[in-house]
Image: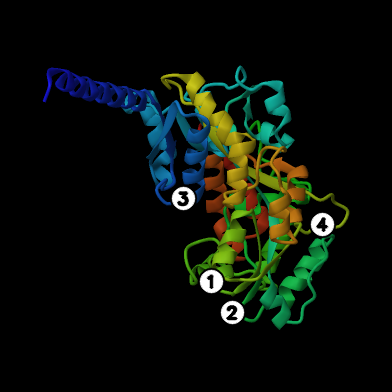
């Protein structure tokens, strides 16, 4: 082999190595952005889709998921942010935790990032839900606005006509009794925690608690709503007790998936549960008490930027994408929840099921779930005092009085 050929071979090898080295540097140049969640990101279709779509549009960034599962998430993340570990760049947070984190300085205000066009792109209930003390501290992951789901088969078997979209509480109660069969089937079920009945109190003009931490349970409208549902459990026996419902599984939707509950209020994710269980369903707006206006209550799960994030500007790129049109389209398509952004194309969603229009309509009449500071403590108090009430072993007024007695201290953080 000639010297010239050897030289060319060496130069070729060097050139290849340089190219490979440059490629390796380019790959390494991607900046990782760590996003914390309580979901299993290896299996959750929504998170997988969000990561892929974001990285396609942001080739310089790579999302690295982190996870803390279960009920420990909120407390553990506070510990990490306070100095107990590596602070992520973005974190998932339920809306009822946003006031707690914001008051502790654990998440940063997003006002400087939220342009007017961004804010105008969102449904009003979303902006209302993520605000604390005049500042925006979170962006929507998805929206869960409540509608009523009906098991079509159970209605058909009982020869009960499907309710109209303008049905009343009287209609609802009558239908629930018609669909009840002793201790083997019930017309309706709701879980006996705050998110399971806040919307019913609000529909009647009452509520559980104000955004600034004042109990609303003593309002006549709240007591009337609580009495209505206690009567459905105790007198009509058209709503199962918790022990009756839990015999079919620990999930809130278990009794409906078992074909033992004909109606249940819920958000978009319930559609996926019913589809997977091969249950043919209908959707209707929540029934309205006579003389009241239609209303729904929305729970917003969020994305936030924790204090101590390495580069909040990069964090916002993730948050903005996840909560914007592209990210929210993925949210809708994977049944994660309703979109927070008004710009999401809903045409395919509306074609999937004729009643999906009621889910979309609910966004316009939704108010945020009650989530003041210390709401978690207040909800635990309420659940404890209401347990016997739902069984008919305590009057509504006595249960409410017990909560009201302790509420001022609990809602001011004194417990």
**Residue 45: x %, y % from top left:** 49, 50
Label 4 to label 3, Cα distance in Å?
38 Å
Tell which circle, 4 or 2, labels the residue nearer the N-terminal end.
2
- Quarter of the image that includes the N terminus: top left
Q: Secondary structure at mark 3?
A: loop
**Label 4 belongs to which residue?**
289
The relative height of residue 90 versus residue 205 in the rendered view (above or below) is above
First in sequence: mark 2 vs mark 1: 2
Q: Are marks 4 and 3 in contact (CB under 8 Å)?
A: no
Q: Are marks 3 and 2 in contact (CB under 8 Å)?
A: no
Compare marks 4 and 1 and give the one earlier in the sequence: 1
Determine if residue 373 is in view.
no
User: Nearer the observer, disc 4 or disc 3?
Assistant: 3
Q: Residues within 10 Å of mark 2 (few under 14, many from 20)?
A: few
Compare marks 4 and 3 and give the one earlier in the sequence. Answer: 3
Mark number, residue 183: 2
**Circle 1: element type:** helix
Around disc 4, counting alpha carbons within 10 Å, would you say few (fewer than 14), some (14 to 19), or many (20 or more)? some
Name the mark nearer the viewer: 3 or 2.
3
Is 396 left or right of 77, judged from the image as shown?
right
Q: Measuring 53% from the left and 66% from the top, which residue is drawn there? A: 254
Name the residue at 53% across, 32% down.
Answer: 57
State the residue in front, 367 or 20.
20
Q: Secondary structure at mark 2?
A: loop
Q: Quote the CA–CA distance across marks 1 and 3.
A: 31 Å
User: Of marks 1 and 3, which one's residue comes earlier in the chain?
Assistant: 3
Disc 1 designates what residue? 244
Of labels 1 and 3, the one closer to you: 3
């Amino acid at each position: 082999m000639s010297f010239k050929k050897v030289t060319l071979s060496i130069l070729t090898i060097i050139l290849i190595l340089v190219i490979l080295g440059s490629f390796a540097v380019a790959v390494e140049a991607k900046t990782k952005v760590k996003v914390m969640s309580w979901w299993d990101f290896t299996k959750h279709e929504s998170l997988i889709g969000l990561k892929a779509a974001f990285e396609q549009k942001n080739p310089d960034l790579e999302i690295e998921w982190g996870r803390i599962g279960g009920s420990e998430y909120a407390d553990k993340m506070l510990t990490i942010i306070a100095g107990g570990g590596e602070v992520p760049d973005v974190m998932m947070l339920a809306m009822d935790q946003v006031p707690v984190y914001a008051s502790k300085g654990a998440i940063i205000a997003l006002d400087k990032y939220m342009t007017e066009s961004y804010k105008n792109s969102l449904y009003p209930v979303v902006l209302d839900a993520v605000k604390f003390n005049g500042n925006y501290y979170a962006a929507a992951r998805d929206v869960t606005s409540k509608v009523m789901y009906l098991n079509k088969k159970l209605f058909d078997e009982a020869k009960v006509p499907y309710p109209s979209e303008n049905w009343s509480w009287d209609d609802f109660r009558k239908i629930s009794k018609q669909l009840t069969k002793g201790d083997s089937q019930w017309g309706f079920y709701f879980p006996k925690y705050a998110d399971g009945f806040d919307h019913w109190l609000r529909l009647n003009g009452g509520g559980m608690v104000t955004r600034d931490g004042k109990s609303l349970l003593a309002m006549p409208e709240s007591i009337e709503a609580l009495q209505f549902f206690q009567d459905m459990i105790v007198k009509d026996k058209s709503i199962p007790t918790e022990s009756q419902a839990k015999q079919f599984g620990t999930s809130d939707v278990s009794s409906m998936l078992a074909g033992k509950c004909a109606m249940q209020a819920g958000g978009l994710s319930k559609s996926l549960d019913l589809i997977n269980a091969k249950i043919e369903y209908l959707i209707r707006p929540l029934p309205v008490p006579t003389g009241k206006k239609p209303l729904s209550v929305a729970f917003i799960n969020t994305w936030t930027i924790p204090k101590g994030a390495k580069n909040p500007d990069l964090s916002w790129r993730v948050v903005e994408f996840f909560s914007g049109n592209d990210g929210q389209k993925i949210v809708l398509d994977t049944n994660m929840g309703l979109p927070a952004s008004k710009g999401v194309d809903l045409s395919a969603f509306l074609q999937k099921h004729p009643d999906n229009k009621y889910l979309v309509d609910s966004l316009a009449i939704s108010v945020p779930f009650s989530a003041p500071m210390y709401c978690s403590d207040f909800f635990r108090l309420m659940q404890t005092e209401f347990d016997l009430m739902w069984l008919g072993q305590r009057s509504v007024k006595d249960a409410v009085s017990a909560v009201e007695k302790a509420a001022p201290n609990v809602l001011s953080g004194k417990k």
